[in-house]
Image: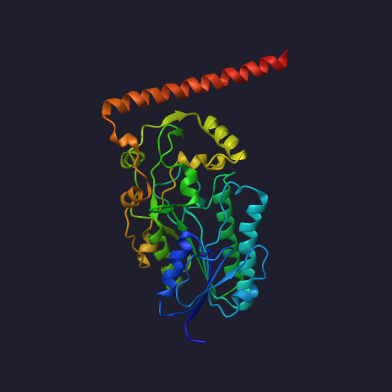
Amino acid sequence: MASGSNIVLTGAAGSLGRRVAARLAADPGVARVLAVDLVEPRALPSRTTFSAADLATSDLKPLLEGADTVVHLAFAAGPELDDDGTARANVEGTRRLLDAAGAVGVDHVVLVSSATVYGAWAANPVPLTEEAPVRPNPGAGYPVQKAEIERLGAEWAISHPGATVTVLRPAVAVADGERSWLARSLGLTAGVRAGSDDPPLQLLHLDDLADAVELARRERLDGPFNVAPDGWLSGEQARALAGTPPRVRLPEKAVTAAAGFLWRWKVGRMPPGLVPYTMHSWVVANDRLKAAGWAPSHSNEETYVEATDGTPWSQLSPKRRQELALGGAAVAVVGAAVGAFAVVRRLRRRSR
């Protein structure tokens, strides 16, 4: 076998996985890449082979034999995210992968986590650095599961002296025609919001995230690293770029209740646990990763424009925008009143 690194890449068929696989294939220092996923990627780069496997159930040790590095991108997300089965698959799959990596002598693991692990709290500093505590909001399945995966990685590093674990905490990652589950769930341009203000926003280009993964793999970075573009957008700037109307503001409890109802029936995009992430800041500093040699090639503004479709709102005159905004607010108020009246009427009928 040719000399060089032998790498196992999980989640290889996803938007990020395909980008990382291409970068690994372009590195002459990489001898072989084993791409692992439930489905085979549309195309495999040179020196890359594929193996279909479920991390939660498959025998992983044979897949990792001879590997020196594992790049773990696999993570199940969707309407079933908060189901116990999916949570176990994400966490137990990572546990089993790490156990297999330790058994065959892998000495470097790259885990892709999320900036959401810091939690969205009113007292968060702006921006958050890697020294900030990991405290995801309770009930938010995505951040909670990512934080648990980080904990497993930290435990594995302690029990395997000499091994290195890189933890990357990216902001919301998107690209042209590719919006992550997190980006869609947060409803970055949705017309209804809880709270009085929109928090600052960071959008990371998937190409920049793939570059960060490759740098972490190549340089064997150790510990947590935030991955985000320079700075951030205010809520007002984001709305101006997207050409969206002003938000209709509703109480947090009302938005959370509506999100929970729609989520339970699998017709809503936002799990109720993510509502705080639309209310409070959780933007991160990228200084540590930049000091290691990474630099974003896309700004927040460039990524937002590339990933966000234009809306008819941006083509309207200022007067017409004001008329429609006032009308939208009135509709929301009337809708809330009608809903409340219906609830009261049902309660009265039950009491008779």
At 39% from the left and 61% from the top, the residue drawn is 207
**Viewer-closest of 68 and 315:** 315
**Viewer-closest of 40 and 89:** 40
At 55% from the left and 39% from the top, the residue drawn is 268
**Viewer-closest of 229 and 309:** 309
Q: Left or right of 261: which side holds 118?
A: left
Count of numbered labels shown in the rendering:
0
Q: Quadrant of residue 34?
A: bottom right
The answer to whether residue 212 is above or below residue 218 is: above
Q: Position of residue 85 (x, y in %)?
A: 67, 53
Q: Position of residue 11 (x, y in %)?
A: 53, 63
Q: Position of residue 167 (x, y in %)?
A: 50, 63
- Residue 120 is at least partly visible in this image: no
Q: Position of residue 176 (x, y in %)?
A: 38, 53
- Residue 278 is at least partly visible in this image: yes
**What coloring was used for the rendering?**
rainbow
Q: Left or right of 68: which side holds 203?
A: left
